Structures are given as C-alpha cells and as structure tokens.
Amino acid sequence: MLVAGLVLVGVFAVLAIFAPLIAPYDFNALSGPDGDFGSRTPPSPAHPFGTTIAGYDVLSRVIWGSRTALLVIVIAVLASIFAGTLLGLVSGYLGGALDRVLVMITDAIYAFPSLLLAIVMSIVISGGQSSLWGGIWSAALSITVVFIPQYFRVVRSEVVRVKSEVFVESARVVGASRGRIMFRHVLRNSTRSLPLVFTLNASEAILTLAGLGFLGFGIEPNSAAEWGYDLNKAIADVTNGIWWTSLWPGLAIVLVVMGLTLTGESLNDLADPRLRSRRRVKAGSGAVAATSVTSPAAPERGEGMNE
C-alpha cells in the first residue's frame, strides 16, 4: 500500500512540477500550429484525450490541473498546520479561559460541513474583486479554515499530555522561560502525528477543491485549470455520449486521492508500535521455521569421526 501510494503521489508531483514541459499546450489554449482545436473533438494523435466543449485540450487541462491541486494543497495544508499548531500549543499549555474560548470556537467551526464552510469562506474571501483572490489563493485560504480545527485538536491533546511530563517540570525547576518550555520541550514532543494528519488532509483538500470547482465557487477558469470545473462543464457531454471530457479529470481526482490515502494509511500503520511488534514476531517465527526446515541435520557424534 505504501509503495503504491508513493508511486501515485510521485507521478502526480512530477506532472505538477513539470507541467509546462509535459503538457502539449497551455491550459487556456484554443489553437495550435495547425489551427483551432475544435469543440468536442474525439481522442486523436493530435489530442490524445480529446477536446472539451469550449475547445480546450483535455490532456493539457488534466496536467495543468495537477499543478493547481498541488499549489492548493501546499498553501492550504501548510497554512492550516501553522495556525492550528500555534493555537493548539497556546491553548493546551496555558489553559484557563483562553483554552475554553478557543475550544468552543474550533468546535463551532468543526460542526459545519467542510464543503459548506469552504463555500462560505470562498465567497467571503474572493468577493469577486480581484483575480488574485478569485484564483488559487482564494481557494487555498478557504480550505485552510476547514483544516485548522483538526490540527488544533491533535496538537492541543498532545500538549495537555506532554506538559505534565517529568522533563517539563524539570525545565521549570531549572528556571527555563515559558516560551522556551513551550517551543523547545512541549512543541517538539507534540507534533509527531502531524505527518499522518497531513497526508489524509491533503486528499480531503483535493476533494474539497474539486467540490468548490464543480459547484462554481472555486478557481476562476481564466486563472488556472481545475478538475472540478472541467467536470462541471462535462455534465452535458455525458448525456450526449461524449465520455472523454469527464473521464480523465474524474480519473485524475480518483488516482491522486487514492495515492494520498494509501500513503497516509500506510504511514499510520508503520507508526503503530503494536503492528511493528507483530511484524517482528512474525519475522522471527518465520526465520526460525525456515531454519528448522532448510538446515541439514547435524551428524551424530562419532559418525563424522568414523567417516
């Protein structure tokens, strides 16, 4: 599972990073050296994935969409990790009224359906005023708000546990400052599970981005290519027997989400000490069994001497 997930994620990352070199055309190109692409052109050597109703090359849109998804994942998840970790650290370590207020706010945010909350934040952030805020940044920041409560909960629970450990009390006794204890001792021992949450949230971020684009609240079509927007425009094509405009963007979403999910679940299994101990026991028992089966029997005392 881990190898399969890493392969899918690696292919997705390569397409995203090298999109200008891999994609045959730009994401908004309507013509090439041979003229206009044409509308709803079936797959051909010139357009392996066909063209859309608007005349875009589907292969180019899928490749450029991977770059859009990667940028949104990086911005949204990293921003939510920073904000959620900082708030969880302060809330769990200081406690008191501040902790109760932050917990209440994050619980209220967490109670909203993630897609609905992302739609509301996208409308509030973009406002239809700027192409910058109507593009990748708007979608990424709207998804950021969805993930902050998850990192807040994880970090806060770990901070509450770690701050009562003996090494933290020892740091207080020797006169370490509150900031040094929080960031040097407590934070370093409270973020071990964040990589697992990161991989799982990355897949959810792609689904949320696709949902925003499908509903018309995501990235503007003239700002970047986005798989959810392309699926929305391909709805009418499905009823007319035109399959290529919806198959490839949908397949890209499925494969990327599958790769990130497999990677996250595998890392979670590898981080479980109980599973590691079971693997050691199985490996040890298998080695003993193999030794007992394949090892030749030792000669009796005296047989070798007589020979």
Image (cartoon, rainbow, N blue to C red):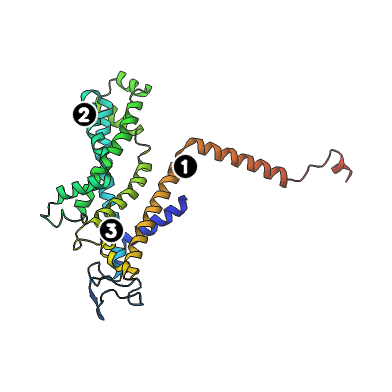
Q: Is residue 218 left or right of residue 46?
A: left
Image location of residue 104, percent across then percent down: 23, 31
- The label nearer to you, 3 versus 1, is 3
**Element assignment for label 1:** helix
Image location of residue 90, percent across then percent down: 25, 30
Amino acid carrying label 2: it is Val
Residue ranking furthest to the left: 129
Residue at the location (68% across, 42% down)? Answer: 289
Amino acid carrying label 1: it is Leu
**Residue situated in front as seen by the camera: 158 or 123:** 123
Q: Is residue 8 above or below residue 35?
A: above
Q: Report the Cα–Cα distance between label 3 and label 2.
A: 36 Å
Kindly indicate whether the residue at mark 2 contacts the one at mark 1 (C-beta within 8 angstroms). Answer: no
Residue at the location (19% across, 49% down)? Answer: 122
Image location of residue 156, percent across then percent down: 30, 31
The label on residue 270 is 1
Q: Is residue 56 left or right of residue 203?
A: left
Precedes in sequence: disc 3 or disc 1: 3
Precedes in sequence: disc 1 or disc 2: 2
Amino acid carrying label 3: it is Gly
- Residue corresponding to mark 2: 101
Residue at the location (35% across, 73% down)? Answer: 48
| Residue 19 visible in the snapshot | no
- Residue corresponding to mark 3: 228
